[in-house]
Image (cartoon, rainbow, N blue to C red):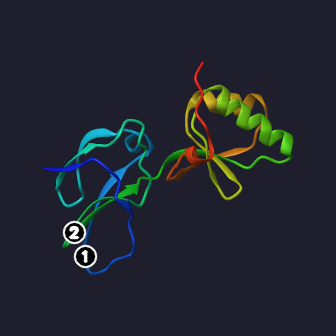
Amino acid sequence: MIIVDKILGHAGDRTDIEQDTIQLDWEGRQKARQRLLTQAGREIALALPTGTILTPGDLLYRKASIEIVVVGIPEKVFVLRAEPQIQFGLLCYQIGNLHRPIGFDGTDVLTPYEPVLENQFNRFGLTYTVEDRIFTHSASQLHSHVH
């Protein structure tokens, strides 16, 4: 078993080395401690610092002929394009008020699909689509808070 206790950086596009992958959805990328199988069947144990959130492209392991990289799995997300600006503020408020994660892809606002959010968006007349995309939280742009 391979034990991973830190992220080594971001994987490049090397063609001279076998690139094995761990495919994880948003929830799976939030778990700092878990046992996983790579696509090639290698067993790894994540023992990352508490609070570590993996992102697609993270390099978890590298030896002479192999590297193991995180790959995001597309999952059902809301895609919101809020205009005018007041609508953008309203939708971010609704998502934040329910303590749901939020991400940005260009001008698109993304959040994992949940029926309770769909009810809120419909109630306030917000425009959205539901699509399969790789969700990545924009945690690097935010600070944490507690109640």
Could you say which quadrant of the image residue 14 lies in?
Answer: bottom left
Find residue 119 and report its horizontal and vertical position in percent: 66, 28
Q: Is residue 17 left or right of residue 84?
A: left
The 10 Å Cα crowd at callout 2, few under 14, some 14 to 19, many 20 or more, is few
Q: Is residue 66 left or right of residue 51?
A: left
First in sequence, mark 1 or 2: give its number: 1
- Asked whether the residues under the numbered discs 1 and 2 touch, taking CB atoms below 8 Å apart as contact, a structural biologist would say yes
**Residue under pointer 2:** 66
The one nearer the camera, 70 or 121, is 70
Could you say which quadrant of the image residue 99 lies in?
Answer: top right
Q: Is residue 76 above or below residue 146?
A: below
Rendered residue at 41%/49% (across/down): 54
Q: Is residue 63 above or below residue 141?
A: below
Rendered residue at 60%/28% (across/down): 145
What amino acid type is highlighted by mark number 1?
A: Ile
Determine the secondary structure under disc 2. strand
Rendered residue at 78%/34% (across/down): 90
Find residue 127 and report its horizontal and vertical position in percent: 75, 43
Q: Is residue 69 above or below residue 119?
A: below
